[in-house]
Image: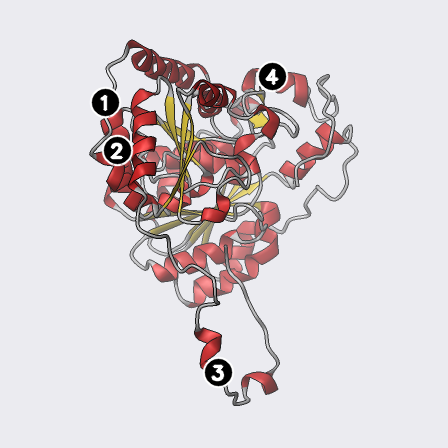
Amino acid sequence: PGPCHIDLPKDIVSMKAFVPDAIFKQTAGAEASAPMLDMSQIQKAVDMINRAKRPIFYVGQGANHCPEILTKVAKKANVPVTTTVHAMGVFDERDPLSMHMLGMHGAAYANFAMQNADCIVAIGSRFDDRTTGVMDKYAPKARAAEAEGTGGIVHINIDRTTFGKVIKPTIAVWADSEHALTAMEGGLEASKSPERAEWLKQCMAWKSAYAFGYVKAPGGLIKTQQVIEATNAFLQQSGWADSKDVFICTGVGNHQMMACQFVRWNRPRSMITSGSLGVMGAGLPFAVGTQVANPNSVTILFDGDGSFNMTNMDLQTIVRYNLPVKIAVMNDNRQQMVWIWQRLFFDGRYISVDNVNPDFVKLAQAWGMEAVSCDNETDLPKVIEKWLTHDGPMLVDFKVVPDICLPMVAPGKALDEMILLEDREAIFGKSDEELGHMKFEGLAPS
């Protein structure tokens, strides 16, 4: 998914052509939609959830159109909810049942919950490798419960080709997520078992012990996490998170994952980003499209200097149409995520990761756009407020100290075998010159 540009020669697009009706007809054997609900599968899923001691909902973007029924079902059954990056906000992350985003740079508490759940209900998700870790070690408690006949994996998806593609589900429900959840809602019960109460208590303990965090920069300097955290604080404290249509777009890299971590998402489809393919440079075009499609919205772009350098000519588009996009360039003069991989997997043999940047403030001002710079935590709150409340487009060049994005599931590791904040010095070292003593093997992530 994402923008796609097809460029055809002028003589081709100017020609007339006869297009047979068959081109627009469904291919023989193809299925336009899922069949009527198989209520026997629905009942099996309901029974498994009601019986489970440690259930969790693992929700993907296939449920983005039905946040209301998802919330109703999760609250009725009292089941914790974790989401993929593209489903953030489908379940309000401020709710105590929310375990936030899971996966490679997801919440440690979500990953622990997935690995310890005896019943995983995958709703509109596809078991992408960024959310599973190495498959041989994935969902051990759910697989054990399946063998014992007390739990397992329920997979709800409108695309039945996903069933068994990555992991074979115990129960497959071929249906639209909304239809399946609506059918399940009447039969689900709020378990009063002591095991379920202990499970929820354990999930809350993990959330408290392994909350997202970072090591602050010395001397009052700022980091990307700090900027995003301050932006989220303004959105929450001002009430904008609930009263306005707020969309957050990102480029690709550390800032992208840190946005996932430090924003509390409360509406589906409010995070506009390039997952899967991870297309650097997509952030600014995404922001342009988002603002045009939602003219009354607050559209925020968190971009890295590397991503922003690839498409910043689109500042022209923003100025031409006076699109009130709020642009934050996380300027650490590096392609920091790639720098991290070269440090960890190639013993610090760096190549092509140091950016030669223009003065982003002068660049924006050259287009006639309001722009300022910020490099310290004292000025940060007032800069954030000025930036977000400015009437029109505005860019802030946040001069940030480079950092590593943690938690992190390294390649070849289980979902719960994470590098945590407490391990930072062991892998990252004390300075750019000093490598950590923890070594990595295998291929760096693509």
Q: Is residue 142 visible?
A: yes
Q: Calculate the distance from the C-alpha at mark 2 to the C-alpha at mark 1.
A: 10 Å
Front disc: 1 or 4: 1
Is residue 362 shown left or right of residue 446?
left
Q: Which residue is mark 4?
A: 423
Asked if 17 appears above or below 389 in the picture, the reply is: below
| Quarter of the image where one finds residue 101 | top left
Q: Amino acid at mark 4?
A: Asp
Looking at the image, which is closer to me, 307 or 92? 92
- Residue 239: quarter of image: top left
Per the image, label 3 sits on a secondary structure element best described as loop
x, y percent for residue 26: 44, 68
Q: Secondary structure at mark 1?
A: loop
Classify 10 Å Cα crowding around label 2: few (below 14), some (14-19), many (20 and above): many
Determine the secondary structure under disc 4: helix
| Mark closer to the observer (4, 2) | 2
Q: Is residue 235 visible?
A: no
Q: Nearer the viewer, mark 3 or mark 2?
A: 3
Q: Residue furthest bottom?
A: 16
Q: Amino acid at mark 2?
A: Val
Q: Give how far apart the Cα atoms at labels 3 and 1 are.
A: 56 Å
Q: Distance from label 4 to label 3 (Cα)? A: 62 Å
Q: Which residue carries the number 1 mark?
A: 190
Disc 2 target residue: 73
First in sequence: mark 1 vs mark 4: 1
Q: Tags 4 and 2 in contact by the CB under 8 Å rule?
A: no
Mark 3 highlights which residue? Answer: 20
Disc 1 residue crowd, few under 14, some 14–19, many 20+, Cα 10 Å: some
Residue 358 is left or right of residue 244, and the answer is right
- Measured in 3D between alpha carbons, the distance from the residue under mark 1 to the one under mark 4, in whole angstroms, is 38 Å
Q: Are marks 2 and 1 in contact (CB under 8 Å)?
A: no
* Residue placed most toward the observer, 373 or 62: 62
